[in-house]
Image (cartoon, rainbow, N blue to C red):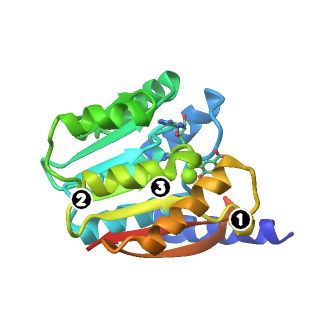
């Protein structure tokens, strides 16, 4: 019952002013047709990522966890000319579908989809010695959130913003004794935030079409 209400409110907000366009809708339809799980961000969450990246004036974005490129499209559309998103995806068929979706959205030029487990592709990325990333969206396997956070600090700068998805999971995060690797990953990440002097962070729980979950927002000081 309550989930139906959350979903209805999300639909109302999205229909009223979030304005998905044909390319965003087609990306979700293509993902569904290919049998990918519907674990993309919701439209209003994608718009939040887009707005955060714009507020921050982000020119370079690193996303970990591409799926079909839905969040990637929202992020790419936040960039100024010459901006770039690098997005890391372990599943080849996800990455290939993402490339098709990004092309349909007209943002291929701005996005580099890299295939491989992120813990393998991140060291290669670091070796390229690119400019620091302005914005991160961490949304891949949850057990490795602590490692991805460390990479984000390493590849970032003062003022970089790190958004981490799925840090609440219907309150599963409360279970200190959980043996679920995802829960343990999120809790370990929270402990890192508590101890890390180089960042200022918060976390927000959300309800909506995607259930009860939440995201962390981390500013590198
Ligand atoms: N950001 C996307 C959703 C990502 S879902 C959106 O909102 O539209 C999580 C993705 O992370 C899946 O496609 C999964 O294959 C990928 N993934 C899981 N483990 C990974 C790893 N170790 N390295 C890179 N990608 C991984
Ligand atoms: C899952 C992953 C996500 O990134 C998400 O937003 C929701 C669910 C999952 O792996 O189940
Ligand atoms: Mg997610």
Q: Quadrant of residue 106?
A: top left
Q: Quadrant of the N terminus?
A: bottom right
Q: Is residue 147 shown above or below 112?
A: below
Instruction: Work out how far the residue at label 3 is from the one at label 1, CA to CA, in angstroms.
Output: 16 Å
Q: Circle 1 sits in a helix, a strand or a loop, which is it? A: helix
- CB of mark 1 within 8 Å of CB of mark 2? no
Mark 2 neighbour class, 10 Å CA radius: few under 14, some 14 to 19, many 20 or more: many
Q: Position of residue 168 (x, y in %)?
A: 64, 65
Q: Earlier in the sequence, mark 3 or mark 1?
A: 1
Q: Quadrant of residue 169?
A: bottom right
Taking 81 as reference, is 142 left or right? right
Numbered tag placed on residue 102 in the rendering: none
Mark 1 neighbour class, 10 Å CA radius: few under 14, some 14 to 19, many 20 or more: some
For the point 19% across and 55% down, the residue is 59
Closest to the observer, 131 or 68: 131
Q: Quadrant of the C terminus?
A: bottom left
Q: Circle 2 sits in a helix, a strand or a loop, which is it? A: loop
- CB of mark 3 within 8 Å of CB of mark 1? no
For the point 51% across and 38% down, the residue is 67
Numbered tag placed on residue 20 in the rendering: 3
Instruction: Work out how far the residue at label 2 is from the one at label 3, CA to CA, in angstroms.
Output: 25 Å
Q: Position of residue 188 (x, y in %)?
A: 56, 60
Taking 74 as reference, is 78 left or right? left
Q: Give the number of the mark in front: 1 or 2.
A: 2
Q: Is residue 6 shown above or below 117?
A: below
For the point 46% across and 58% down, the residue is 46
> Where does label 1 land, which residue?
7
For the point 66% across and 58% down, the residue is 210
> Where does label 2 land, which residue?
134
């Amino acid at each position: 019952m309550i989930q139906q209400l959350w979903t209805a409110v999300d639909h109302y907000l999205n229909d009223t002013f979030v304005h998905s366009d044909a390319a965003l809708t087609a990306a979700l339809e293509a993902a569904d047709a290919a049998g990918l799980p519907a674990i993309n961000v919701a439209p209003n969450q994608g718009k939040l990522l887009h707005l955060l990246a714009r507020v921050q004036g982000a020119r370079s974005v690193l996303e970990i966890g591409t799926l079909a490129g839905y969040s990637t499209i929202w992020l790419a559309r936040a960039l100024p000319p010459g901006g770039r998103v690098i997005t890391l995806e372990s599943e080849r068929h996800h990455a290939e579908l993402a490339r098709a979706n990004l092309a349909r959205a007209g943002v291929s030029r701005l996005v580099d989809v890299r295939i491989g487990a992120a813990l393998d592709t991140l060291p290669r990325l670091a070796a390229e010695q690119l400019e620091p990333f302005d914005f991160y969206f961490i949304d891949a396997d949850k057990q490795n959130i602590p490692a991805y956070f460390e990479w984000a600090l390493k590849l970032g700068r003062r003022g970089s913003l790190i958004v981490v998805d799925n840090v609440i999971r219907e309150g599963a995060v409360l279970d200190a004794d959980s043996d679920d690797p995802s829960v343990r990953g999120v809790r370990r990440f929270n402990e890192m935030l508590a101890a890390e002097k180089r960042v200022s962070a918060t976390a927000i729980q959300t309800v909506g079409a995607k259930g009860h979950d939440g995201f962390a927002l981390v500013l590198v000081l």
